Amino acid sequence: MEIIKEEIQKKIEDLRKEIGHEEAEVNIKEIIYIPAEEKLIIITPDRPDKSAVIGKGGWVVGRLKESLGVKNIHVAAYVDIMVKEYRMKLALKKLNTYLSMDILEDPLPLHNFKKLLLKKMENPYDFNFLDYFDLKDHPHNYSSDIKKNQHTLVALSGGVDSSFSLIIAHLLGFNPLALTVDPGSIVLPKHFKNNIESLCHLLKVPQVYVPADFTGIIQDSFQGRFHPCGPCSKKVHEKIFDYAHKNNFKIVIFGDLLSTGCQSILSSEGIIRINLPALLGVSKQELKRVSYHFGVKKVAGFGCPLLGEVEKKFPHMSRYSIQRVLRETRSGALEPGEALELIWSSFKHFK
């Protein structure tokens, strides 16, 4: 199917009129059509141009998809792509410093990581991890020539972010151990544990639960003294690094999306911390695609049961959850529609 940029621009303008949207100049920088996926990628110069193409409530792009007969249309703003590319360049520079230091017994996984990053930099707006690792025809049988006695610790909570990190670490040959801090079901409910255990079983990755006493955090949260996420995150990190030190792990991987660029790979007290999704400039949609492919189940809403109960008792605490969602949106990790869904889940506590 031949798709011409000028014809698409004209079609979008006509659709906006048909729907009743106000007149807008439609600017498109580039159009890419992927026949194998029946997918159209529209790259606009800036975010307002992206909004004009999508239309209010996604009506314009939805109608465009119907009229063209394609399965999927992805709209991206070039300014966002530029930011993502710059962050990945910063991450690559930092990664190279660790590779040059020769501090690991076997640096092959980091070299594999670098190859993946370079490949993603070639296609920052529509990179397909499933194609890169040839997972569509061979879903879970990837193996790499990595020494079996080298381990990396991956913090695994059972959500899509940390699940993505474990999957990619495994595919890159890090030979990971999945570590889950378990403060009890009010923080780590059964559906998260199901995700953890199913994924580790599928990948044949060893997994450990580390018990933690969060009594003080839970009690203070229920008294409205603070939002639980900050103290909880701090204690979880302490537990993870304590385990890493005691068991001589040299690399700890997290599913952090926000610490991009130079902050995506850091070193402290002889341990390298990698914020894997942030280093790769991954969006929420990209990591969901990988995690769901490996059977990770979607978890509705935002946060754990403790957070839900605290927000129910103290609705004003929702503002701090919303701030977190907005930070991920500003960073480009979340699309506005995804952010709206999460924010709406926090607003349910308001009467």
Image (spheres, rainbow, N blue to C red):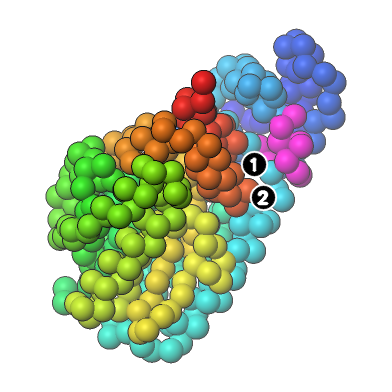
| Picture quadrant where residue 177 is located | bottom left
- Disc sitting over residue 76 in the figure: 1
Residue 123 painted magenta: no
Between residue 166 and residue 53, name the one nearer to us: 166
Residue 276 in percent (x, y) is at 42, 61
**Residue at the (36%, 42%) spot, across then down:** 222
Task: Report the label total.
Answer: 2
Residue 80 in percent (x, y) is at 66, 50
Between residue 210 and residue 198, name the one nearer to us: 210
**Residue at the (50%, 83%) spot, across then down:** 97
**Residue 112 visible, this angle:** yes
Q: Amino acid at mark 1?
A: Ala
Q: In the picture provided, is 44 more to the left or to the right than 329?
A: right
Picture layout, residue 45 above or below residue 282: above
**Residue at the (76%, 36%) spot, across then down:** 49
Helix, strand or loop for disc 1 = strand
- Disc sitting over residue 298 in the figure: none
Mark 2 to mark 1 CA distance (whole Å)? 7 Å
Picture layout, residue 247 above or below residue 219: below
Residue 49 painted magenta: yes
Residue 248 in percent (x, y) is at 22, 80
Please identify the residue farthest to the front as the structure is shown.
223
Q: Which residues are magenta?
A: 42-52
Between residue 100 and residue 246, name the one nearer to us: 246
Q: Amino acid at mark 2?
A: Asp
Q: Quadrant of the N terminus?
A: top right
* Residue where numbered disc 2 is placed: 80
